[in-house]
């Protein structure tokens, strides 16, 4: 009796089961199902966006530290390149009547200033390009960068010695050796980042990686040639020509990358 009475419905309840009531019930259930699917879809979409954006906590710490490296390096480059003009001075006994002659007599100071300004500027552009693609750093990167800045800070002295003694072979060797060391350290820094993929932008074009390496290795190679010419060739103009060729070779390697359709920075 209990079971049969539970399954039977009263006439009032049966009267409520009209077609419209049944349709409303089905519609509500369908809407609830759709609402659940929409909520699940929104949740999945949010999860996907969060996964693509990566962990938000680790990246700011890394980039903040990298920014300090960049700002400190820019300051050293700016100070070194500004100090070069202090080497361009007139003789203390210069007279107004001899001013034109004295201005022309210090042409080695103009040359040393202009050429060193150009080379430090190229070192700075190299540094900017390198740290555009370097995404993280380790102690090797920090050590090499600090060593590079040490040599950059030394370059105004080497430039002054060359300006004061333009025909001195020791002065030329000192200047050339300073550029060789700066070029080797800069190239080594990029080589380290190039082979440690966790430090560099994974989307960087492999061709561009090698082009950068060749471009920046040109400076120490040509200055080594210049030092050899200073030692063994009597005429210093051959050594100066090899040093000037550094800039032209770097421009040629850069132009070749652009001709191949790759970015140059």
Image (cartoon, grey):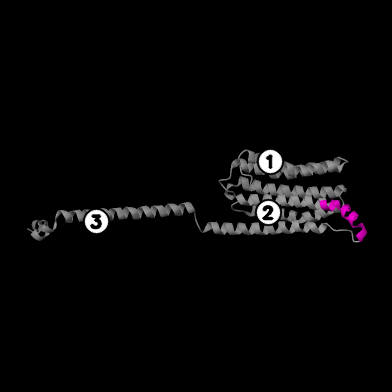
Which region shows up in magenta? Answer: 93-110
Q: How far apart are marks 1 and 2 (CA)?
A: 24 Å
Looking at the rendered image, the disc whose residue lies closer to the viewer, 3 or 2, is 3
For the residue labelled by badge 1, is the local secondary structure a helix, a strand or a loop? helix
Tell me which secondary structure the magenta stretch mostly adopts.
helix
Pointer 3 or 2: first along the chain: 3
Looking at the rendered image, the disc whose residue lies closer to the viewer, 1 or 2, is 1
The residue indicated by pointer 3 is 28
Label 1 crowd bin: few (<14), some (14–19), many (20+), radius 10 Å: some
Q: Residue at 91% of width from left, 60% of height from top?
A: 96
For the residue labelled by badge 2, is the local secondary structure a helix, a strand or a loop? helix
Q: Can residue 246 be seen by looking at this rendering?
A: yes
Relative to 27, 70 lies left or right: right
Q: Work out whether 248 lies above or below 114.
A: above
Residue 2 x/y as whole percent: 9, 59
Pointer 3 or 1: first along the chain: 3
Question: Is residue 60 located in the magenta-colored stretch of the structure?
Answer: no
Residue 240 x/y as whole percent: 82, 44
Identify the mark at residue 145; answer none if there is no mark.
Answer: 2
Question: Is residue 103 located in the magenta-colored stretch of the structure?
Answer: yes
Q: Residue at 67% of width from left, 59% of height from top?
A: 72
Q: How far apart are marks 3 and 1 (CA)?
A: 70 Å
Q: Which of 8 and 17 is in front in this view?
A: 17
Q: Work out whether 139 lies above or below 209.
A: below
Q: Residue at 51% of width from left, 59% of height from top?
A: 57
The residue indicated by pointer 1 is 253
Label 2 crowd bin: few (<14), some (14–19), many (20+), radius 10 Å: some
């Amino acid at each position: 009796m209990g079971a049969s009475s539970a399954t039977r419905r009263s006439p009032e309840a049966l009267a409520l089961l009209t077609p419209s009531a049944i349709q409303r019930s089905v519609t509500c259930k369908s809407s609830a199902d759709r609402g659940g699917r929409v909520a699940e879809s929104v949740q999945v979409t949010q999860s996907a966006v969060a996964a693509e954006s990566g962990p938000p906590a680790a990246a700011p710490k890394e980039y903040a530290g990298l920014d300090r490296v960049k700002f400190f390096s820019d300051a050293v480059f700016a100070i070194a390149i500004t100090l070069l003009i202090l080497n361009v001075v007139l003789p203390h006994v210069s007279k107004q009547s001899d001013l034109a002659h004295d201005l022309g007599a210090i042409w080695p100071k103009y040359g040393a200033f202009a050429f060193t300004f150009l080379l430090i500027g190229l070192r700075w552009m190299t540094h900017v390009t390198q740290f555009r693609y370097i995404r993280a750093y380790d102690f090797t990167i920090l050590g090499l960068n600090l060593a590079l800045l040490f040599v950059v800070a030394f370059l105004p002295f080497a430039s002054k010695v060359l300006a004061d003694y333009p025909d001195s072979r020791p002065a030329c060797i000192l200047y050339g050796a300073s550029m060789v060391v700066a070029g080797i350290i800069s190239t080594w820094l990029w080589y380290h980042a190039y082979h440690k993929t966790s430090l560099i932008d994974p989307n960087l074009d492999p061709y561009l990686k090698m082009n950068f390496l060749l471009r920046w290795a040109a400076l120490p190679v040509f200055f080594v040639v210049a030092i050899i010419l200073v030692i063994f060739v009597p005429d210093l103009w051959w050594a100066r020509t090899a040093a000037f060729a550094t800039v032209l070779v770097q421009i040629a390697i850069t132009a070749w990358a652009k001709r191949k359709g790759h970015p140059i920075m």
